[in-house]
Image: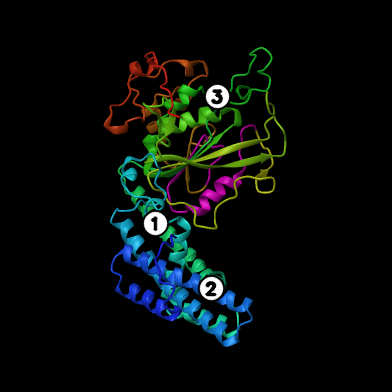
Amino acid sequence: MPKAVAIVAAKPLPSLVKEAAAALSRATTAAEVLDAHDKAGAVYDMAKRAARLHKAKAAHDELVAATYRVQADALEIESQAKRRLADEYDAAQERGEVAKRGKPVNVPERNNKATTAEIGLNRKDIHEARQMRAAIARNPAIVREALDDILASGDEPTRTALKRAIAPAVKTLRSEDQAAKKERRALREVALAAGYKELPAKKYGVIYADPEWKFDPYSLETGMDRAADNHYPTSDLLTLMRRDVGAIAAKDCVLFMWATVPMLIEAICVLDAWGFAWIERDPNTGFLAPNKAHARYISHWAWLKNRIGTGYWARGKHEILLIATRGKPVAPAMGDQLDSWSDDMAVEADVGRHSAKPAVFAEWIEKHWPNTPKIELNAREARPGWNAWGYESNPVANTGEGVNGAIAAASGDPASRGDDVEDRQRPASPGFTGGRKRGGGKPVSAEQDHAPLRKRGARKAVPA
């Protein structure tokens, strides 16, 4: 924090401590709290320099101890100011005067609010202030007791020493906070699940999808011997994008979607078409950029196979499970997240039947969303408590009545109706209504969908 505080050097340090304490007690605004904090910090710095100077000159122990006492007093006032600062900052966020973390910078309303840096603070300041507030709330005397222990041992009462002294209490509070968050997360998952079940048409809060990607080899004559088409029917990108998965997704929903490495860009296009990403072209730069206000790609997991595959530039040995959300579904509780990727953290599992995925991923999803309605698209086998749709799903085990019809009717997808492979290339039925109804727009008709794309204008120069 800035330390631009004018202090008269001629004043004795104890009187400066009293002035800082008085300033904090009189403070009624965030600016006054910050000013008192800076005054206490300045006195602390002065006492710290004086104590070290006394020690360097081999001054009497009583003089060094007296200076340490002033240093500790200033540090206590600074700690109390941090507590007040955390309150003022959080209140400013609630009033909408300061931007909250987590909202993307390309969301317009965020740009109207001051950031932490713009008010002269940084995230570390706020984090430490909140930690201090939590510790003092648990034990109002924790700072004084810690400083007295430091002084009694003859050590210098520095900020680092104080932080180390209260670290066990902070760690305990963090553990309790995480436990409370897990409990709140579980309660919200139950509440959302109940809301989904009350909808007139069943909606799903968790969708686990394994699209039947069609990968075109460089040579149709020599490259089809290992193609997925030899093992199961595949669909081209347009067919997958027309599949209106958004029609069965709840307002707050998380999508787990498998993608092969060479089809990553196509997978992002499918996320956009299904309503789990929102990609726009910036009118000023001409570049594509995600709008994360309502739907977003979050992360992905990697399945490290124990058998290497084919490839042109790189031979594939892993597949990725993309994670995307719309609305505000519950995230995994802190500490319960599945590791994503590194040499020792990738989820390694045996390769089964062609395109079959390890059960560990679905089991993890089921464990953390036990009450939320779940559906698996292109399911290989029935899972208790899940609905299933698509390739190889058992109609008897599919307890989601109307799921097949809902997706097929909405998407006009021949593959979803079980038609022959040759028929999958025909145009969508005139009744097709895609899931792209953004901003109050009308559904896309079949004629509009097959109309030639508008020619994009030249990109504007990007400002230097």
Q: Is residue 286 above or below residue 104?
A: above
The residues bearing labels 1 and 3 have C-alpha atoms spaced at a distance of 38 Å
Residue 96 shown left or right of residue 389 in the figure: left
Q: Is residue 46 above or below residue 406?
A: below
State the image coordinates of residue 281 (x, y, percent, origin top left). 40, 27
Outermost right residue:
307
State the image coordinates of residue 208 (x, y, percent, origin top left). 50, 40
Nearest the camera: 275 or 294? 294
State the image coordinates of residue 68 (x, y, percent, origin top left). 53, 80
Q: Amino acid at mark 3?
A: Thr
Q: Amino acid at mark 2?
A: Lys
Mark 1: secondary structure: helix
Residue 15 among magenta residues: no
Badge nearest the viewer, 2 or 1: 2
Q: Residue at x 40, y 22 (%)?
A: 460
Q: Is residue 283 above or below residue 101?
A: above
Q: Of callouts 2 and 1, which one flags the residue occurring earlier in the amino acid sequence?
A: 2
> Which quadrant holds residue 183?
bottom left
Residue assigned mark 2: 48
The residues bearing labels 2 and 1 have C-alpha atoms spaced at a distance of 49 Å
State the image coordinates of residue 230 (x, y, percent, origin top left). 63, 22
Q: Amino acid at mark 1?
A: Arg
Residue assigned mark 1: 188
Residue 363 among magenta residues: yes
Quadrant in the picture for the N terminus = bottom left
Extent of the magenta region: 354-383
Report if residue 246 is visible in the image. Answer: yes
Quadrant in the picture for the C terminus = top left
Q: Of callouts 3 and 2, which one flags the residue occurring earlier in the amino acid sequence?
A: 2
Residue assigned mark 3: 234
Q: Of callouts 1 and 3, which one flags the residue occurring earlier in the amino acid sequence?
A: 1
Nearest the camera: 47 or 270? 47
